[in-house]
Image (cartoon, coloured by chain):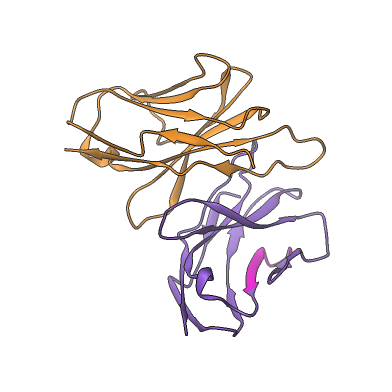
Chain colours: A purple, B orange
Amino acid sequence: AQTVTQSQPEMSVQEAETVTLSCTYDTSESDYYLFWYKQPPSRQMILVIRQEAYKQQNATENRFSVNFQKAAKSFSLKISDSQLGDAAMYFCAPSRDSGYALNFGKGTSLLVTP
Amino acid sequence: EPEVTQTPSHQVTQMGQEVILRCVPISNHLYFYWYRQILGQKVEFLVSFYNNEISEKSEIFDDQFSVERPDGSNFTLKIRSTKLEDSAMYFCASSDGPRGLFPSLHFGNGTRLTVT
């Protein structure tokens, strides 16, 4: 993927509620991979979840799940039962069209309120 | 759990000076990457490195940049003559071989480069 769009610069969610972060991308590949990374204030990049494009089943990792729509080139992240520690910048990162590197979107800043 | 380590955490340099950012990838990983993040902006791909050579680079990675794996453990990014716009957080990442699956990237904590 060469273009990644995260249309929500900021999102807010109350503790214990559910929030969905959106991501769309552009690619000419049929086989690729998609990732969500979390960047807390410490600025460390932490892998949240990954999805293989050839799999129809949406990936799930505890409270985190994705809605992958291949035809629409959409890859949204759902966070259930939000916790204060989920507050961070979230980056959508599909694989580049060559090699094993990733492209990143501009990120969505998630605020979790008590 | 093994981790990618980067040194220093913060480096200040004067415009025009050479700077070397250092990274120790996870020991059994084969692919190495540098990314940068200008404050408040997205994370941008710079270069990937495999089998002792550059496998891919972005348009940002011009002749001012170079990478090297001088020994079996370190992976360095050199900026020959720094500019003010090189001020950013630089992230090193590594991944293991594909083994049939696209490898996940593991990132270091970053080096904040400030060019004055």
- Whole-percent x and y of residue A93? 58, 54
- Whole-percent x and y of residue A85? 52, 69
The magenta-colored residue range is A70-78
B104 lies left or right of B46: right
Q: Front-most of B44 and B33?
A: B33
A93 lies left or right of B17: right
Q: Which image quadrant for residue B83? A: top left
- Answer above or below: position of B50 versus A8: above
- Whole-percent x and y of residue A50? 69, 56
- Whole-percent x and y of residue B14? 17, 31
A1 lies left or right of B18: right
Q: Residue furthest top?
A: B71
A47 lies left or right of A108: right
Q: Which image quadrant for residue A22? A: bottom right
Q: Which image quadrant for residue B28? A: top right
Residue at figure coordinates x 21%, y 24% from the top left: B17
- Answer above or below: position of A26 versus B61: below
- The total of numbered circles placed on residues is 0
Decide whether residue A97 is among the magenta residues: no
Residue at figure coordinates x 51%, y 82% from the top left: A13
Residue at figure coordinates x 78%, y 42% from the top left: B101
Residue at figure coordinates x 47%, y 30% from the top left: B23
